[in-house]
Amino acid sequence: MREIILDTETTGLDPASGHRIVEIGCVEVVSKMRTGKYFQAYINPERDMPEEARRVHGLDDKFLADKPVFASIVADFLDFIGDTPLVIHNAGFDMKFLNAELIRHGFPPLPMERAIDTVTLARRRFPGALVNLDALCKRYNIDLSGRSLHGALLDATLLADVYLELCGGSQASMAFDGSNNRETVEEAASTITPQAIPARDFPISEQELKAHNQFVETIKNALWESTHAKSEAGLEVK
């Protein structure tokens, strides 16, 4: 039931063009609930920061100059994520950068099968609607007041809340112990003893019956007076 919500910030859009990761943020989720455990690292990309990228996340060359390189944090990163599923918004982008770094440093790439793409989940839930992180936070009334710039850990934290909502939110489970186990829910449901509800009698008063008969007499050519209807009901046909 453990999942890792993950986000990265980079120097650009494509590692094949020499762009690198500058921040990784991970948030641990167990049974679709945040545990409070997280991993975050700023990374020296060993290259310059393009201005268009700096405007997105606010990380510049001066800030990143004394930060560790990827080789220094990769062991801690891999230890934190373990072999759990990775929940990522637009997973192809982040997985491409992570695998480029891993391969560069002699590690096997992460299989795409591990990634759960929340963009895909959101498009299935809201076809034709905007599904970027800001739009989904607004849809689910998730507080964005502290987000003036992108940040990997901040965005991973927001995505954790969005992911919970995409998976059903507070209604994801009937269990009150925090579990989201289908067998637990079915077991709990099986212990409920159905209660028989006695039939209720609603007698008609003479006044109501008289009023009804008077009303029926005002209906001309009533369907139930036809020969066919009487025959189907087993009544005597005159």
Image: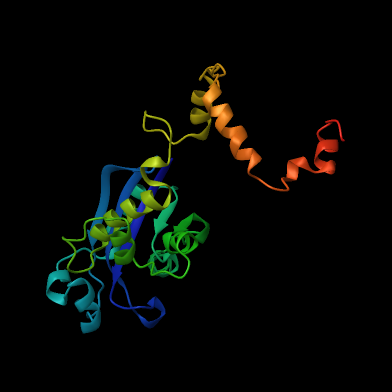
- The answer to whether 31 appears left or right of 194 in the picture is left
How is the rendered protein coloured? rainbow
Which of the two residues, 111 or 176, is positioned nearer the viewer here?
Answer: 176
Residue sticking out furthest to the left: 62
Q: How many marks?
A: 0
Which residue does the image show at 25% across and 78% down from the upper left? 53
Q: Is residue 219 above or below residue 177?
A: below
Q: Is residue 12 left or right of residue 204?
A: left
Residue 76 visible in the displayed image:
no
Q: Which quadrant would residue 159 be assigned to in this image?
A: bottom left
Determine whether 66 is above or below 223 in the image: below
Specify the quadrant of the image occupied by residue 238. Answer: top right
Locate the N terminus and report the quarter of the image it occupies: top left
The x, y position of residue 210, in whole percent, is 58, 28
Q: Residue at x 20, y 83 (%)?
A: 51
Q: Which of 232 and 151 is in front in this view?
A: 232
Say whether residue 70 is left or right of residue 198. Answer: left
In percent of width and height, residue 160 lies at 33, 52
Residue 10 location, quadrant: bottom left
**From what the image shows, is residue 184 above or below residue 21?**
above
Residue 82 picture location, percent across and down: 40, 47
Nearest to the observer: residue 17 or residue 106: 17
- Left/right of residue 37 with respect to residue 17 in the rendered view: left
Tell me if residue 26 can be seen. yes
* Residue displayed at 38% across by 53% down: 163
Measured from the top left, where is residue 81 in percent x and y?
Answer: 37, 50
